């Protein structure tokens, strides 16, 4: 018995040492602090020079992500239906495909055309898009975009499709084995500056697109992009749901159109094979050409220098400590990076379980930009916070319109969006 106990303790010591060396202790410590909001002072909206309002419209529900076309002054939103979002979320091991929303869509706002409390609003049709085995349904999650020279816009959308039986086309009852059938879909707007629909250009399906969270478009003629896998490669429900966070299994892939690229390269390659702790909404900053990858667990943004083939240099160019759990990054016209953050991350669970309830969950927007001082450091500023959850949704995306100073907020399960005008 004593020998067995000594052996068990020895094994435990090896395991703990391995965990320590694999940086799990840092992830656990930092993630726990951000989860409970340790050290964060919640401030009300009244402390900031903004006037905020909600826009309640069934076309603007459950908008996980947004992208602003500076060239056409259109704001594109990846929307769905609140109750269906968390029924079908393979990245976080929710596999009820029968409960998924069948009304996923892209909504567009013409932000220079006020209409009532909001703006001129349209849902974009997707004629010719096959969806899952011909059903035409778009299970849209993350998005990115690019302005083309002729006033057209290309959009890269993550479509979280369920897996089907190849023989019958029926949706499989047990999706946990496959983890769903996530793809990246490239579309181009129909209608230019007042888009009415989306023409489907290309589907990217690849083993390296595993648990896609967000796309960062290169914006050139190849339809190339980076995509972040927030839970990495695991298809095991327990590992994908929980352990992938703490064991830093997240990754980034780079993909290029096979229809255009003729030098026999694979469609996708691993830009960062693994080692990221819950990487979230990455973005490419066209002002400096760098890729910004946030970690929701560590509250940091890693900055990488892409090589010409889309690979990322193994040594990070920089890391910015934001100090909050972060979701989808966005870059404005001036090159500033904007981040929606969760001041007390544990509180978002109540919203996910009851999207239509009034929970008073704090939300905030942070601005990240290169400092102008001699040290050349980074400035991280809390620009706006709704510490009491009075107006803003539980925000997974924030867009800053540098032309007006206006901020837009949306949330993955929120039944509304919010707009804040600078006073």
Image: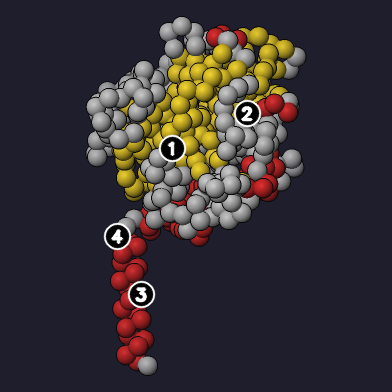
Residues 72 and 327: in front is 72
Q: As drawn, is 45 to the left or to the right of 192?
A: right
The answer to whether mark 1 and mark 2 are in CB contact below 8 A is no
Q: Is residue 142 left or right of residue 389?
A: left
Q: Circle 4 is placed at which residue position?
A: 21
- Nearer to the camera, 137 or 166: 166
- The residues tagged by marks 4 and 3 sit, at their Cα atoms, a distance apart of 14 Å
- Name the quadrant containing residue 369: top left
Res. 340 visible in picture = no
Quarter of the rendering containing residue 404: top right
**Mark positioned earlier in the residue sequence (1 or 2):** 2
Q: Tell me which residue sits at (39%, 20%) in the image.
A: 219
Q: Residue at x 67, y 37 (%)?
A: 102
Q: Counting residues from the N terminus, which is met first, the one under dot 2 or under dot 4?
A: 4
Labels 1, 4: front one: 1
Quarter that holds the C terminus: top right
Residue ID for mark 3: 12
Helix or strand or loop: what does disc 2 sit on?
Answer: strand
| In this rendering, the label closer to the viewer, 1 or 3 | 1
Q: Quadrant of the N terminus?
A: bottom left
Q: Residue at x 46, y 14 (%)?
A: 147
> Which residue is the extreme one toward the top?
150
Q: Which badge, 1 or 4, comes first in the chain's sequence?
A: 4
CA separation in Å, label 2 and label 4: 44 Å
Question: As displayed, is residue 67 above or below residue 41?
Answer: above
Please say if the residues under marks 1 and 4 sit with CB atoms less than 8 Å apart.
no
Residue 243 coordinates in the image, percent (x, y): 45, 58
Could you say whether the residue bearing mark 4 is in a helix, strand or loop? helix
On the image, the x and y values in percent for residue 371 come to: 35, 24
């Amino acid at each position: 018995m004593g020998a067995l106990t000594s052996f068990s303790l020895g094994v435990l010591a090896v395991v703990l040492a391995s965990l320590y060396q694999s940086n799990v202790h840092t992830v656990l410590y930092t993630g726990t602090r951000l989860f409970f909001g340790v050290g964060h002072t919640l401030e009300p909206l009244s402390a900031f020079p903004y006037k905020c309002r909600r826009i309640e419209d069934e076309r603007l529900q459950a908008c996980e992500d947004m992208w602003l076309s500076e060239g056409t002054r259109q704001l594109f939103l990846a929307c769905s239906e609140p109750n269906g979002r968390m029924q079908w979320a393979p990245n976080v091991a929710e596999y009820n495909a029968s409960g998924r929303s069948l009304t996923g869509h892209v909504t567009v706002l013409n932000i220079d055309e006020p209409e009532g409390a909001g703006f001129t609003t349209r849902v974009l049709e997707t004629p010719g898009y096959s969806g899952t085995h011909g059903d035409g349904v778009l299970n849209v999650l993350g998005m990115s975009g690019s302005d083309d020279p002729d006033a057209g816009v290309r959009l890269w959308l993550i479509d979280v499709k369920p897996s089907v039986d190849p023989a019958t086309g029926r949706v499989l009852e047990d999706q946990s084995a496959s983890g769903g059938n996530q793809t990246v879909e490239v579309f181009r707007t129909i209608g230019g500056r007042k888009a009415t629909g989306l023409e489907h250009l290309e589907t990217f399906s690849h083993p390296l697109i595993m648990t896609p969270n967000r796309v960062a478009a290169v914006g050139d003629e190849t339809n190339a992009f980076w995509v972040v896998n927030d839970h990495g490669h695991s298809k095991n429900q327990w590992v994908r749901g929980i352990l992938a966070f703490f064991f830093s299994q997240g990754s980034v892939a780079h993909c290029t159109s096979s229809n255009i690229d003729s030098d026999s390269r694979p469609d996708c390659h691993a830009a960062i094979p693994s080692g990221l702790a819950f990487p979230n909404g990455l973005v490419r900053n066209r002002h400096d050409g760098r890729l910004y990858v946030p970690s929701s667990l560590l509250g940091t943004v890693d900055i990488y220098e892409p090589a010409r083939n889309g690979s990322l240099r193994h040594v990070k160019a920089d890391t910015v400590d934001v100090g909050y759990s972060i979701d989808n990054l966005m870059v404005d016209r001036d090159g500033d990076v904007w981040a929606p953050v969760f001041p007390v991350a544990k509180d978002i669970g109540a919203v996910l379980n009851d999207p239509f309830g009034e929970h008073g969950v704090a939300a905030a927007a942070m601005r990240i930009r290169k400092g102008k001082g001699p040290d050349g450091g980074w400035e991280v500023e809390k620009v706006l916070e709704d510490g009491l959850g009075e107006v803003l949704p539980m925000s997974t995306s924030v867009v800053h319109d540098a032309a007006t100073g206006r901020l837009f907020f949306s949330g993955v399960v929120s039944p509304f969006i919010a707009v804040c005008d600078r006073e």
